Every structure is written in structure tokens, then in C-alpha cells.
Amino acid sequence: MRGLHLRELTLNNYRNYEQISIQFGGKKVLITGKNAQGKTNILEAIFLACTGRSHRTSKDYELIRFGQESCRVRVEAEKKTAQFSIDINISRKDKKKIKINGMTIQRMGQLMGHLNGVMFSPEDLKIVKEAPSERRRYMDMEISQIKPQYFYYLQQYNRVLIHRNNLLKQIKKNDELKKMLGIFDQQLAEAGAFIIQKRYEFISKLSNIAKEIHKKLSSDAEELTIRYKPSIRIRNYEDIRSIQEDFLAETERMYWEDIQRGNTGVGCHRDDISFELNGMDVRIFGSQGQQRTVALSLKLSDIELMYGETGEYPVLLLDDVMSELDEERQIKIFQELGDVQTFVTTADYRSIPSAELEKFEILVINEGKIKKKVNSL
Ligand SMILES: Nc1ncnc2c1ncn2[C@@H]1O[C@H](COP(=O)(O)OP(=O)(O)O)[C@@H](O)[C@H]1O
Ligand SMILES: [Mg+2]
């Protein structure tokens, strides 16, 4: 494998793993074993090295093995241009510590863009089905990996938003404080405009790619359109200044309501994305099967988009999704994936098409230990 790939993963006191170290020989990796043995935990640890957080929980301490004080995930990886290592230390007492090539990073954002990864899991359906916050989280994760700067603006935005909301609550009691709102509004609009522009660009590119991929997956029957739905009307996405103006104007228009409510009614924290199949909103009118296929098209598009933007394919983490798909779709997906390093978990490896199986090295997991590692079954 010439592109981005993991060479070694080491876990210490991570979830149900006491200590393991796995070397990957460049093939695709199939992780199998009975339920609740630790298959997903391995993908979660890789995803943690990609993004600094788990795809399942925002509470880092849940990752620490029961009864232990801290855990560690270490990854050795390689891409076209360099070899690198990522080391993550999570402790019950201290802040999370991340090292890249042995150097401690000061801000989480510095991790972004080193090891890019795309996770497929049954929970992806939430992106299509559930509340807008799921879609924002998805969007933020993807864009942060492609554009680490985005992550800084997002953190900045969220910080200012908290201050602004606190101030709004105080203004209700003390009208004098009103004059301080202007500073926060300005800062919110600055970070907000950057975020809005990047979200727009991301969704536009994603929509183009997803249209093609979804067409293939649905055998030409459905046209998928993904749209960015900002909570503020934007006149011109190309012009960052005019986005700022739109942002400020809308914030000012909501001023009075914001004070009454004690929080900020419009902005990036209220944005959404819509998914349409042949013009119909999948979230509301789509069948379960259609929603599932849209989620899949979305993730497959992420891979292409990351490749287009960074020149490297991300590593792929397929958690328990293969058994949900018929063989034809599985084969289509594996074709789509080509030479990308792929980690697949399944309780039943016989659900993987046999012609594909020989491209995998296989790990059999049992109670947080590797029972067997074979080159193919
Ligand atoms: N913090 C933790 N410490 C110890 N064990 C944990 C922790 N969190 C989860 N587990 C265990 O991990 C197992 C689930 O692992 P998971 O990877 O989700 O299984 P699966 O093989 O079904 O994907 C369960 O046995 C659970 O008790
Ligand atoms: Mg699992």
C-alpha cells in the first residue's frame, strides 16, 4: 500500500484491552469474533487517533479500562510523504495528552489532518434521520479533517457563543450590559462567516460526488441532492465580508428575542443539511432502506472528497455494516474502495463475499485479546 496506512496499533488499558499491539501487513483487515469481545473498540481507537475523539461517546473517561487510571492509544502510520506516530493519553485526572512524532501538541486542532479516517457504522443512519445536531457534527468532523483551520474557527465560535449567551442572560437583569453585545456579535460573525463559507463549499462538492455514487448504488433509479441549509440567509457565499454582514444583520434583527430567551437564536449552531431523493426529503419521506443507502452514499463520497482535497485516501473503518447489505452492494462497495486501507468488523465473516475475503488479513478477537491472526481464512 502506497497511500495512507496504519502499520501498528498499540492499546493500553483501552476499553476491554489490557495491552495489545497489532502489526498490519498492508492488506485490508477483517476483525471478527463474537459479540461484545472488542471488535468495535479497535475501530474506535483508530478513529480516536484520527480525530481526537471517539465516534461513540464524548466522555473520554469511558475509554479507560474499568478500574484503571489512564489509557493509551498509539498508532504508527505512513503516508506518501512521511512516516509518523500518534500517541494519545487519557487519564481520569488530567487533560487528554496528544503527541505527534513524540512532540506534545498544544491544541487538539493540530491533530487534524494527520491520520484521516472515515467511519461507517450502523449509527450513520442518525445523520440522515435524526436532529440537525447530528448533521452538524458530521459536517464539522469531515471539514476539520480536510481543513484543520476550520476546527479552530469552530472552537472560537463555540467559545464566543457561550460568552454571548451568558451575557444575554445578564442583560435581562441589567440593561446597562447591552452595550457589550456588539463585541461578541462581531467575533461571532467573523468566525461564523468562515464556518458558513467552508460548510457551503464542502456540501457543494459533496453533493456533486454523492449524486454519482448514489446513482450507481441505486442502479440509476434515484438522484440524490445534498443541500446546505444555513440558519441565516446568505446573499453571496464567495464573499466572506458579505457573509459577515448577513450574519451581523440577522443577529441584530434577532436581538430582542435573544435577550428575552437568553440565548442566540441564529447562527452556525442552528445550521442543517438536507438530503433529497428525486426532490423528496429523505429524512421525512424516505424508507428505512433509502435512508440507509443515502448514509452509505454519503460516506463513500467523503472518501472521494478527502482524496480530492488532500491527495490521500483516508483509512476506512467499517463497523458491522457489511452484514446489513446484500451481496451485490457489498461487491459494489469493495470495488469502490480499491486500494484504500480498510478495517472491517463483523461477527460473521461468511457474510463477506468469498472473492473479497482473500484480500484480508484476519484478526479473531476474544475477550479483549487476539486469539488468532492469520493471513487469510
Ligand atoms: N471502559 C471499559 N473497560 C472495560 N471494558 C469495557 C469498557 N468499555 C466497554 N467495555 C467492554 O467492551 C466490550 C464491548 O466491546 P465492543 O468492541 O463494542 O464489542 P464488539 O465486539 O461487539 O464490537 C464489552 O464487553 C464491554 O463490557
Ligand atoms: Mg461492535
Image: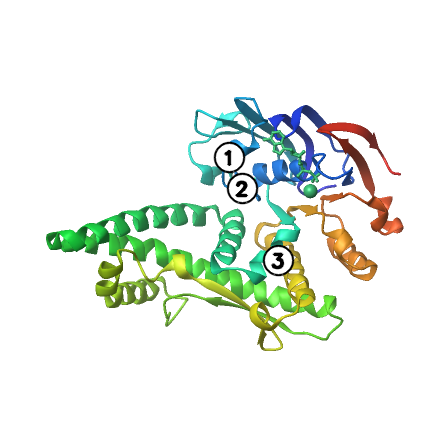
Looking at the image, tell me whether mark 3 or mark 1 is earlier in sequence order.
1
Which residue in the structure is indicated by mark 1?
A: 60
Instruction: Kindly identify the residue that appears in the image at 44 percent across and 24 percent down.
Output: 93
Looking at the image, tell me whether mark 2 or mark 3 is earlier in sequence order.
2
Which residue in the structure is indicated by mark 2?
A: 57
Residue 247 image-quadrant placement: bottom left
Q: Position of residue 115 (x, y in %)?
A: 59, 40
Q: Where is residue 82 in the image (x, y as percent from the top left)?
A: 62, 35
Amino acid on which the number 1 mark rests in the picture: Asp
Q: Identify the element where label 3 is drawn.
A: helix
Q: How far is mark 2 from mark 3, CA to CA?
A: 16 Å
Q: Is residue 81 visible?
A: no
In this rendering, the answer to whether 61 lies above or below 230 is above
Label 2 Cα neighbours within 10 Å, binned few <14 / some 14-19 / many ≥20? few
Q: Where is residue 335 in the image (x, y as percent from the top left)?
A: 78, 56
Q: Identify the element where label 2 is drawn.
A: loop
Instruction: Kindly identify the residue that appears in the image at 53 percent across and 66 percent down.
Output: 204
Ligand 2 sits in quadrant: top right
Label 1 near label 2: C-beta < 8 Å? yes
Amino acid on which the number 3 mark rests in the picture: Leu
Which residue in the structure is indicated by mark 3?
A: 125
